[in-house]
Amino acid sequence: MLKKIHYLSLFPETIREGLNHSLVAKAQASGKVELNFVQIRDFSKDKHKTVDDVVYGGGAGMLIKAPVLVDSWLSVSSFEQKALPVGERPYTILLSPQGKLLTQDWAKELVKTHQEIIFVCGHYEGVDERFIDLCVDEEMSIGDYVLTGGEIAAMVASDVLIRLLPGTVGNQDSISTDSLEQGLLKASQYTRPREFMGISVPEVLTSGNHQAIADWNEQEAREKTRKKRPDLYHKILEKFKK
Ligand code: ADE
């Protein structure tokens, strides 16, 4: 079970502040998860604290240099540890638009498999490929678009992971009935008042008939997914065909 997340970043305070709210802050305060922030620039050895340089061959923009990245990584891991089996050592994930797309299923697997995760946030045009070769286990993307850096992506991923830790969300039912938990969106939900601006809560939901409510929720979830996310809906149909 995930216990600790390290962040290697040029803007660690942004991530710290971004994750200091609501249930995620509570999970930290109660010790469910520990977050450790590492400033990559602290590992620069020159007097100007340079971390980036031009791209060999004349590519656009600047890259974060391999030595500062490796040294900052070595402050939270080691090559001896890297040789250990996955699951018994910190798992290094570089946030990058080149990575595998983050999904709820992948998040669940990460939380279950690893005690420690190291998120590395690239900035500028990216990172020297040798850092990836040497230290990174996997690259993760949060969507098919390009952010200015990995910090926001690391915050998104952390929120998803921490939310899955037992006890972060008060009622574990909330997790098991999440949108996407069964591959479907959640059925529409309502709270008081029963009628608002001429729109009534579907009658079945106030009937007290638990079986009828469960059936309605299931049907709604299916219908909503088919309408709003036909891509997900077809994925599920394919799964059932197998
Ligand atoms: N860094 C820049 N763009 C990104 C994305 N889409 N996902 C993760 N990290 C990124």
Image (tube, rainbow, N blue to C red):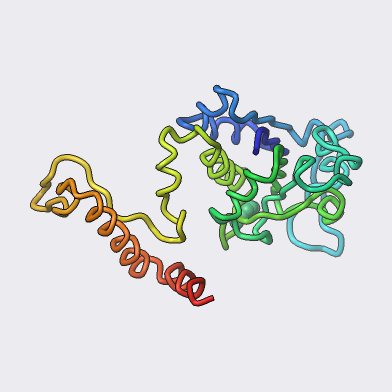
Drawn side of residue 50 relative to residue 28, left or right: right
| 226 on left or right of 13 | left
- Compared with 30, 57 (above or below) is below
Q: Nearer the viewer, residue 101 or 112?
A: 112
Q: Position of residue 17 (x, y in %)?
A: 55, 30
Could one spot residue 62 in this view of the protein? no
Quadrant where the image shows the C terminus:
bottom right
Q: Position of residue 146 (x, y in %)?
A: 60, 58
Q: Residue furthest right?
A: 80
Determine the residue positioned at 68% across, 59% down.
99
Nearer to me, 66 or 53:
66
Q: Does 85 sit left or right of 144 as displayed?
A: right
How many numbered marks, from 0 up?
A: 0
Can residue 53 be seen? yes
* 232 over 150 or under it: above or below: below
Q: Nearer the viewer, residue 167 or 25?
A: 167
Instruction: Relative to 241, say whether 106 is above or below.
Output: above
Tell me which image quadrant ligand 1 sits in: bottom right
Q: Indicate the quadrant containing the N terminus: top left, top right, bottom left or bottom right.
A: top right
Residue shown at 83% from the left, 32% from the top: 75
Quadrant of the image occupied by residue 154: top right
Q: Position of residue 192 (x, y in %)?
A: 17, 40
* Residue drawn at point x = 59 percent, y = 48 percent: 153
Q: Is residue 172 left or right of residue 32?
A: left
Image coordinates of residue 127 in percent, x first then y, are 77, 52
Hey, which residue is sitting farthest left in the picture?
198
